[in-house]
Image: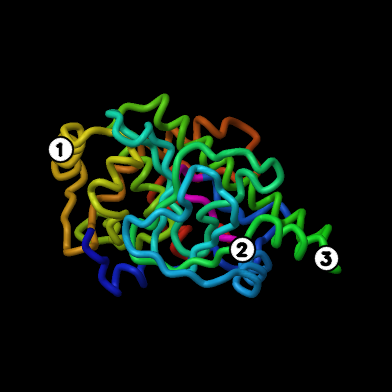
Amino acid sequence: MRRFTDAWIDAVGLKRFAGPWSSPRGPRLPILPWIAVPLHPIIREFFETCGREVHFAPGEKFFPTTQVTHFITVTSGLTGRVAAVLDGRSGAGAMALSPAGRFAAGNLNWVTRRPAIGRYYALSQCTVRMIPHVDAEERILARDDANDFLRILYTQFELGNLSDRMAFSTLALLQAPLRLQAFFLAWSVFYGTIREEGGRHIVRMPSPGRRAHIEDVLSVSSVTMDKLSSHLHAEAAFERDGEFVTFDAAWLQEAHDWMRACDGDGVLYPRPRSVIDFLYGAQAGEYA
């Protein structure tokens, strides 16, 4: 698999929502599928200090088996959490993404030590920090602020679990075109820029991985991906510029409406009615 450019790696670096949270419940950003919010700075600092730095090439697995034994946080690049059929069997997988500043692995089975379904890969060239579960537990419990740290850590776990739940709900309940919208919406919130141009609002963002990665995220075949690509060009004024893409932000509205409906009434951190307002707000830092 060919390497990503430095410009793309920089574009998916840790930028938005990387600072302190506005409340003990996390940032004001609504839950998005497939991509969790970045780690709280205190958590990130802990793993940067205690973890061992390791570099991976695109396609490399983090563990030799399905047994996850370490916490892994991403320093740079893009990684995937793949719930897939067994090697050699046919069928589409389902993948969530862990870009820089997130957990790549370890947050599902820290206490239980149970096998995690699927495998963990580097999708681009990436740098991670690894620390065995046992060592992390000892270091965390020895902290003077262990109770406060654990509360933040468990809040981080919940935010990740809710993102995964929305992702699997998206796969189970939506047709492929809406899944694609939902994925592009999530990626746009974290990495897109939006501007008005000729009466339209245009999103520009780094491509969310290679085509095969997008197929795995959406759990679709290459044939379906061909149809989705045609849909993108016809419905969203989609254009590609190397490893970056542009499209009409209004195309994302239907997926945004579905997420608002999933949230229901009385939401602590509601989504605005307009997806365009949502993207401008994310760009302006309104959901920290």
- The mark nearer the N terminus, 1 or 2, is 2
Which residue shows up at 38% across the image and 57% down it? 122
Question: What residue would you read off at disc 3?
Answer: 142
Residue closer to the observer: 91 or 165: 91
What's drawn in magenta, residue-wise? 32-39
Residue 15 in view of the camera: no
Residue 113 rendering spot, x and y as whole percentages? 66, 43
Q: Is residue 219 left or right of residue 137?
A: left
Judging by the rendered image, the residue that carries numbered circle 2 is: 131
Whether residue 72 sits left or right of residue 81 in the image: it is right
Quadrant in which residue 288 is drawn: bottom right
Find the distance from the CA under tag 3 to the CA under tag 1: 53 Å
Disc 2 residue type?
Answer: Ile
The residue shown at (35%, 68%) is 11
Name the residue type under label 3: Ala
Local crowd size for mark 1, using a 10 Å CA cut-off: few (<14), some (14–19), many (≥20): few
Q: Main secondary structure of the magenta part?
A: loop
**SS state under label 2:** strand
